Structure formats: structure tokens, C-alpha cells
């Protein structure tokens, strides 16, 4: 699963790497401990084919949700069922996005004494998680754009930490994923494969990351010089 990630790049970095333009994005700083309900940049594509970057709330609120707290259980969508599960099917068919991330955290060990690790890209400046989104409207008429990160089986390297990992897309796959006119769900699911082993690496970090209130560059420091 993916329950915590980082985004340390600035707006210019995102626009350049994703060949996209910022739209309706409030000023934000580096986030070293992105948690559910945070408003974070996501990349989409409009009908004119232009990639855009907007801020959405992490934790998908499906069209049928009656209240915001539903999103806490919708931060991830499994690749195996994203096209069939009621909560995600509509978004997978129509509303797909990329979630920029500098890296993500995973924990290993026994419950109550788990060790956190930071997973980061080795070849590229950041990951592009496969995401889905929905603009939810509350019973009072409030509109909230929300997203979920799709997860898939871990690659061999990641399996040392966990059996799941975010589905991350290669640059040459972005157009196919983002195209709002692409409704070929079988072909889209074929993109949700484990990322190449040599494209990621990880190291142990301090347990300070366990507390969502901690959010500083020190969270990325290696523990014990690893």
C-alpha cells in the first residue's frame, strides 16, 4: 500500500518534468510527509490535450459518498479491482491522473515496532504514480476534487519491505494513461505493472516519520549511515 509519500520539487520542476501548466494551485512548499487529506498537486489532461496541474485532496470521495470521512478508506485502489469495484470503476474509466512524488515510505517489522524506509527513484527526478480522481459534491453543494493512488504487486526489490507498491508509470505511458478519450480499460490495466527493480532504491529512516505532524527534510536522512 501507499499511505505516506513526499513531494519536494517546486512548481517549476513539476511543470518542466510533466510538460504541464499550473492551474488553480495554491502556493505550497516541500512536503516530506504527505498524508491522507492533504491537498497535493496532481497531473491531468484537458480536452485540448494540454497537461494541467491542480491540487486535489488525497482520499477519493466517490460520487455516492455522503460525507468527507469516506475518503480515509479510499487513499489507495488495487490495480486488480480498480476496473470493477464500485468506488473506483467510474473514475478509472473516465478520470485518471498522475500523482507526482519524490519518494514514498514503507514500514517493515512486527506491529508496534515497525521500521520505516524511504523508497526513491534512481534514474528520474520523481515518480509518477498512477492515480484516479473524482470531483465530489457534498449534499450542501460543496465541490471537492479528490484522488486515490493505484497500487500493484511489489517488484522483487520492494518485496523485501512489502508485498505491494504504488503503480508507477513510465514517461512513455503518460499520454495513454491521461487521455480522457481512452476508455480501453483492458489496455489501461496492462500499464499497472510493478516498476523496474533498478529504477528504485531504499534506505532506513527515523521513526519520526510515523507522526504526521513531523514534516521536515530531516525525515529523509539515513539512519545509522545506511
Image: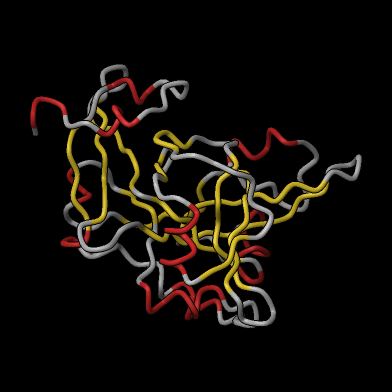
Residue depicted at 68% across the width and 64% down the height? 90
Left or right of 176, for residue 46 = right
Image quadrant in which you'd find residue 82: bottom right
Q: Provide residue 218's location: percent of width, then percent of height.
A: 29, 27
* Residue at screen point 33% across, 38% down: 105
Please tell me whether residue 83 is drawn above or below residue 62 in the rendered image.
Answer: below
Give the residue furthest to the top. 112
**Residue at 47% from the left image edge and 21% from the top image edge:** 213
**Where residue 38 sits: x, y (%)?**
57, 37
Q: Is residue 175 above or below residue 141?
A: below
Q: Relative to 35, is 112 above or below?
A: above
In the image, residue 65 lies at what x, y percent? 76, 44
Report the front residue among 17 and 188: 17
Of residues 151 and 58, the one drawn nearer to the viewer in this rendering: 58
> 50 or 5, which lies in front?
50
Residue 104 in percent (x, y) is at 35, 43
The outermost residue toward the front is: 12
Depth order, front residue of 5/220? 220
Q: Is residue 176 visible?
A: yes
**Can residue 1 be seen at all in this image of the molecule?**
no
Q: Is residue 77 above or below residue 39?
A: below
Q: How many marks?
A: 0
Horizontal arrangement in the rendering, residue 16 relative to residue 131 (left or right): left
In the rendered image, which quarter contains the C terminus? top left
Q: Quadrant of residue 170?
A: bottom left
Q: Residue furthest right?
A: 140
Quarter holding the N terminus is top left
Residue at the (60%, 82%) spot, across then down: 182
Q: How is the image coloured?
A: secondary structure
Left or right: 20 with respect to 193?
right
Amino acid at each position: 500500500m501507499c499511505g505516506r509519500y513526499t513531494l519536494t520539487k517546486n512548481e517549476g520542476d513539476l511543470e518542466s518534468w510533466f510538460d504541464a501548466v499550473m492551474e488553480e494551485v495554491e502556493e505550497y512548499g516541500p512536503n516530506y510527509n504527505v498524508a491522507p487529506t492533504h491537498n497535493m498537486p496532481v497531473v491531468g489532461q484537458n480536452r485540448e490535450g494540454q497537461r494541467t496541474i491542480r491540487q486535489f485532496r488525497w482520499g477519493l470521495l466517490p460520487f455516492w459518498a455522503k460525507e468527507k470521512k469516506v475518503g480515509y478508506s479510499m487513499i489507495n485502489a488495487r490495480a486488480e479491482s480498480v476496473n470493477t469495484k464500485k468506488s473506483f470503476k467510474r473514475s478509472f474509466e473516465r478520470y485518471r491522473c498522475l500523482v507526482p512524488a519524490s519518494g514514498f515510505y514503507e514500514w517493515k517489522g512486527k506491529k508496534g515496532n515497525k521500521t520505516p524506509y524511504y523508497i526513491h527513484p534512481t534514474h528520474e527526478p520523481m515518480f509518477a504514480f498512477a492515480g484516479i480522481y473524482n470531483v465530489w459534491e457534498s449534499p450542501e453543494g460543496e465541490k471537492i476534487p479528490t484522488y486515490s493512488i493505484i497500487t500493484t504487486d511489489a517488484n522483487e526489490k520492494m518485496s523485501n519491505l512489502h508485498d505491494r507498491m504504488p503503480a508507477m508509470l513510465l514517461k512513455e505511458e503518460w499520454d495513454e494513461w491521461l487521455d480522457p478519450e481512452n476508455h480501453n480499460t483492458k489496455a489501461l490495466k496492462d500499464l499497472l505493472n510493478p516498476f523496474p527493480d533498478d529504477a528504485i532504491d531504499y534506505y532506513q529512516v527515523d521513526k519520526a516519520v510515523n507522526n504526521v505532524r513531523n514534516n521536515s527534510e530531516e525525515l529523509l536522512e539515513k539512519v545509522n549511515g545506511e
